[in-house]
Image: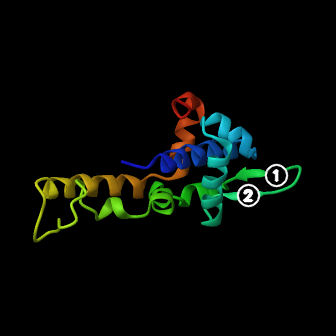
């Protein structure tokens, strides 16, 4: 449902959140290793998240990535998904048919509206803090 880039973005920001709860900045190399992603690919994702204000990036000897508690509580999963994948998931035909719309629905159009609505509600109601605080004690779930 989400692109590979988006999945890695979610893993990265949640890992940054877990470390930030403990007042730790994390380096690009550490993030890439923990989420099992190539470093250059991870750098591109983190650049996108940083450029869009979802995480903070610092350079220098004490540099790395972090996200404040306030930001963790305000950034929702939908923010990550739309920054990385856009909003096509919420309006495109699930089968990829170009002519599908309310007046000319595909075979799954009406059923997918309900799924799409539930997914959107879940993404809008789940913050980075929710994810990070719940996974903090069981980080292995994130890193599988």
**Mark 1 to mark 2 CA distance (whole Å):** 7 Å
Residue 68 drawn above or below residue 24:
below
Could you tell me which residue is drawn at 22 percent across and 65 percent down? 98
Near mark 2 (Cα within 10 A), the count class, few <14, some 14-19 or many ≥20, is: many
Quarter of the figure with residue 113: bottom left
Query: Which residue is at the front of the view, 70 or 124?
Result: 124
- Within 10 angstroms of label 1, few (less than 14), some, or many (20 or more) residues? few
Q: Nearer the viewer, residue 130 or 100?
A: 100
Where does the image place residue 93, in percent across and percent down from the top left?
Answer: 24, 60
Of callouts 1 and 2, which one flags the residue occurring earlier in the amino acid sequence?
2
Report the side of 91 relative to 66 (left or right).
left
Image: 21 above or below 83? above
For the question of whether residue 109 can be seen, the reply is yes
Q: Which residue is mark 2?
A: 57
Per the rendering, the mark at residue 63 is 1
Q: Residue at x 34, y 59 (%)?
A: 89
From this view, report whether residue 28 is shown above or below residue 73: above
Identify which residue, 107 or 15, lies in the foreground. 107
Say which quarter of the image contains residue 70: bottom right
Furthest residue toward right: 61
Residue 31, x across and y down, in percent: 67, 41
Question: Regarding mark 1 in the picture, which secondary structure is present there?
Answer: loop
Tell me if I can see residue 23 in this picture.
no
Residue extending furthest toward the front: 98
């Amino acid at each position: 449902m989400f692109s590979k880039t988006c999945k890695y973005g979610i893993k990265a920001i949640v890992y940054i959140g877990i470390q930030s709860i403990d007042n730790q900045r994390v380096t690009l190399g550490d993030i890439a290793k923990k989420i099992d992603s190539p470093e250059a690919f991870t750098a591109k994702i983190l650049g996108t998240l940083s450029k869009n204000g979802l995480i903070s990036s610092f350079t220098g000897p004490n540099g790395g990535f972090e996200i404040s508690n306030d930001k963790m509580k305000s950034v929702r999963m939908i923010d990550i998904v739309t920054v990385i994948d856009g909003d096509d998931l919420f309006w495109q035909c699930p089968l990829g048919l170009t002519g599908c719309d309310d007046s000319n629905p595909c075979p799954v159009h009406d059923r997918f509206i309900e799924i799409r609505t539930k997914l959107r509600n879940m993404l809008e109601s789940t913050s980075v803090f929710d994810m990070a605080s719940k996974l903090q004690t069981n980080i292995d779930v994130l890193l599988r």
